[in-house]
Amino acid sequence: MNIRSAEDKDRPIIAEIHARSWQENYRDYLSADLLDKQLPELMAERWRNAEIGAHDIVLVAEDDQIQGFVAAWDDEMVYLDNLHVRSDCRSKGIGRKLLAAAARTAKENGRKSIWLHVVVGNDRARNLYTRLGGIADGVEDKDLYGATVPNERIIWRDIDILAEQSN
């Protein structure tokens, strides 16, 4: 498996993976109408128009196809906005590898910490983050396309904890 920076040509597949992941994991939080009818185009538009800055991080994991992606936005503390892996590629360490690669890139950019939100109830993702040294740092509501969804903040105050995960 190869992890590399995403290219413009990858945007449609990133949008597809993103939409499918939400469709599979957010049924308890978002309407079927949004997930099944609106979301594919919303994600396509989102990724088609996403401005990716010089120090923002969008990486893909690929073998014969793109298996997942991570997106993190640069700030004093890097915000890890997305980590999604195709359902048929899960439990192979792809998410862990993408997270570690994003953290290493952020560290190379001089950043010292990284954080994310995880939907409360997404135990699979939350367990991954805490296994990799993330610390729960409170719950807050986020607006996801008009639905208020509780999200737990997970933080790595020392980015090395995440960056040093094995390749």
Image (spheres, rainbow, N blue to C red):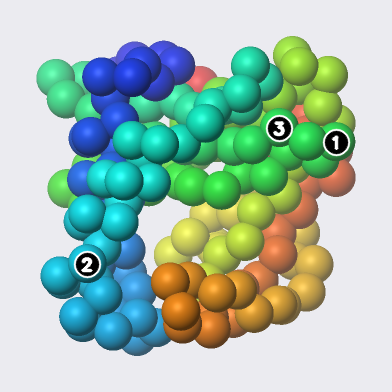
Q: In which image quadrant can residue 67 be found? A: top left
Horizontal relation, residue 6 to residue 39: left or right:
right
Residue 105 seen in render: no
In contact (CB < 8 Å): disc 2 and disc 3: no
Looking at the image, residue 144 lies above or below residue 33? above
Residue depicted at x 22% and y 45%: 16
Query: Residue 76 got which mark?
Result: 1
SS class of the residue under badge 1?
Answer: loop
Alpha-carbon neighbours of circle 1 within 10 Å: few (<14), some, or many (≥20)? few
Residue depicted at x 53% and y 54%: 128
Give the amino acid type for the residue marked by disc 1 in the picture: Glu
Alpha-carbon neighbours of circle 2 within 10 Å: few (<14), some, or many (≥20)? few
| Residue in the foreground of this view, choosing between 132 and 157 | 157
Looking at the image, residue 125 lies above or below residue 93? below
Q: Position of residue 17 (x, y in %)?
A: 26, 46
Looking at the image, residue 148 lies above or below residue 6? below
In the picture of the structure, the residue carrying the numbered disc 2 is 38
Horizontal relation, residue 154 to residue 112: left or right:
left
**Label 1 vs label 2: CA separation?**
34 Å
Give the amino acid type for the residue marked by disc 3 in the picture: Asp
Query: Residue 74 got which mark?
Result: 3
| Residue in the foreground of this view, choosing between 162 and 8 | 8
